[in-house]
Image: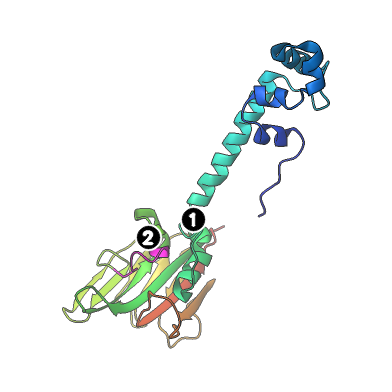
Amino acid sequence: MEEEVPSGSDNIVTEFNTYEEFLNSQITSHDLFYLEDEELARQLVELGYRGSGEVLKREEFEARKAAAEASRLSKRSQQKTLAHTGKDLRNPFLKALASKEEANRSGKMTTIIFIRDKNARGQEISGYIDFAHRMKTEEFEPYFAGKKRLLPRPSDLSFYNWETQTSTSNPTPNYQVIAENASGLLFKNKRDRKIINVDPKIASPGDNSTRTVITFDDDDEPPKYTQVVIYDHITRRKT
């Protein structure tokens, strides 16, 4: 949504820092020549006897000034809630996450991220990450800035260390893990109770769900991974 451009008197409160500056803008050299008193000239402008601009009382100016500042801070705060804002993203994985960030934060979507790669020790690990939950439990700006590498942890939905054969699974506020199943690993959305099947052999992961495989080219910026698959689930309340 495009930011609205201030108009009319709203431009006045953004253009002038103080009420005195606003009054001074309407005082002419002709006024000062005849009145010989800058303060008197200001008073006449405030009363509407001099000046060619809009008559605006001090209380109204200050109220509009406060409202404009509150609006500016509100917009700035909303922008800061999105960790990818202002980042020049050239990595296909980070681009994909950025496109889903707002929907995951608002609850419209719950995304599961499968990552297979090596940890800092060079051990191959893999796991499923609840994107919305991870964003609520840690700051994601360093990931979008390329300062940190997103990897699965033993505390995520599912984690496996191929060298140590350590395996964990954990429920999150969004998903229940169904590990003991003939079809393989399943995740049940706690909001609409729909099942997400992450078996790559099936055509669809489930109702209201999509699977996206992220591929990396040689000219892509880091981070690059051995394998990344994203499962998006559009949440719907039960009726």
Residue found 66% across the figure and 19% down from its top: 59
Disc 1 secondary structure class: loop
Dot 2 crowding, Cα within 10 Å, few <14, some 14–19, many 20+: few
Please tell me in which quadrant of the rendered image residue 64 appears.
top right
Disc 2 secondary structure class: helix
Please name the amino acid that badge 2 sits on: Pro
Lower position in the chain sequence, tag 2 or tag 1: 1
- Whether residue 140 sits left or right of residue 104 in the image: it is left
Residue found 54% across the figure and 61% down from its top: 236
Location of the N terminus by quadrant is bottom right
Please name the amino acid that badge 1 sits on: Leu
Give residue 104's mark.
Answer: none
Decide which of 12, 131 is in the foreground and name it.
12
Between marks 2 and 1, how big is the CA–CA gap? 12 Å
Stretch in magenta = 143-152
Q: Is residue 36 above or below residue 143?
A: above
Q: Is residue 101 above or below residue 201?
A: above
Residue 118 position within the rendered picture, expressed as x and y whole percent measured from the top left: 26, 78
Residue found 46% across the figure and 86% down from its top: 202
Decide which of 219, 95 is in the foreground and name it.
219
Residue depth check, mark 2 versus mark 1: number of the one nearer the observer: 2
Please tell me in which quadrant of the rendered image residue 201 appears.
bottom left
Residue found 21% across the figure and 79% down from its top: 123
Residue 186 position within the rendered picture, expressed as x and y whole percent measured from the top left: 38, 74
Residue 46 position within the rendered picture, expressed as x and y whole percent measured from the top left: 75, 17
Please tell me in which quadrant of the rendered image residue 230 appears.
bottom left
Residue 215 position within the rendered picture, expressed as x and y whole percent measured from the top left: 45, 83
Q: Which residue is mark 1?
A: 82
- Whether residue 238 sits left or right of residue 186 in the image: it is right
Q: Which residue is mark 2?
A: 142
Q: Is residue 149 magenta?
A: yes
